[in-house]
Amino acid sequence: MAQMLDTLAAPASHELEIKHSRFLASAAPISNAADALSFIDSVSIADATHNCWAYRHGNEYRSSDDGEPAGTAGRPILAAIDGQGYDRVAVVVTRWYGGIKLGAGGLVRAYGGSAAECLRLAQRSPLVPMTERILSCGFEDMGIVHTLLANAGAEKLDEQFLAEGMRLHVRLPADRIDALAIRLRDATRDRLRLSEPTSND
């Protein structure tokens, strides 16, 4: 089974000093690549020595060393995002140079470590795969259907009342759909119709 990933519940930051250089890691949840670039732009500090960053949104990811030696900043930040089990997250690590060179290995540890510690201390929010269904039922079953949907954590996207009853478009966690289908079938004596949305829905 694939590992369940998390995103951030809220933006987070963490600061540390390594050999007189100051590192400030800033992280935030993102909903797309444009979000990531907007966040990176908003927290990058113009008078800092470097603003190195990385983001991951599913299979889409990018990173930047922002003037540090190639591979010593952006990639370690991305590795920290993946290593901490995050997705849909952007991280910027801002550095103020303190006069002592860290070397390539030191930079990798500093940037990757700053990002990892920031994410480790941050509040996580599970990314739950969701699915959508169309439910059609008679008026006599409306009460029990609403109760069972609420118990399954389903979100109502659309509701229509037709001559023969009610038609609902709902979204719920994918891992709850099978159990919900069985409960709905049993509660309505198999009168309810459950289907996947089409392009018209």
Image (tube, rainbow, N blue to C red):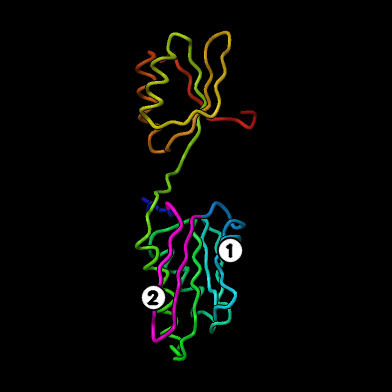
Image spot of residue 70 (x, y percent): 54, 82
Q: Is residue 20 above or below residue 174?
A: below
Spot the residue most to the right. Answer: 200
Residue closest to the eye, 100 or 57: 100
Q: Which secondary structure class fits the magenta region best?
A: strand
Q: Circle 1 is placed at which residue position?
A: 42
Say which element carries label 1.
Answer: helix
Using the image as rendered, state which of residue 175 and residue 139 is in the foreground. 139
Q: Quadrant of residue 179?
A: top left
The image position of residue 156, as x and y in percent, is: 50, 28
Looking at the image, the residue that sits furthest to the front is 47
Instruction: Tell me where residue 174 sits by quadrant.
Output: top left
Residue range of the region highlighted in magenta in the rendering: 9-29
Out of 141 and 155, give the one closest to the viewer.
Answer: 155
Instruction: Locate residue 29, reporting x and y percent.
Output: 49, 55
Which residue is pictured at 48% across the width and 23% down the height? Answer: 194
Residue type at numbered disc 2: Leu
* Secondary structure state at the residue bearing disc 2: strand
Query: Which amino acid is tagged 1?
Result: Ser
Tags 2 and 1 touching, CB below 8 Å: no
Q: Give the side of residue 122 with respect to residue 32, left or right.
A: left
Q: Earlier in the sequence, mark 2 or mark 1?
A: 2
Residue 103: quarter of image: bottom left
Residue at screen point 52% across, 63% down: 55
Query: At 54% across and 74% down in the image, what residue appears?
Result: 51
Indicate whether residue 126 is drawn in magenta: no
Image location of residue 92, percent across then percent down: 51, 68
| Nearest the eye: 134 or 27 | 27
13 to 130, vertically: above or below: below
Query: Can residue 26 be found in the magenta stretch?
Result: yes
Write down the residue under mark 2.
Answer: 16
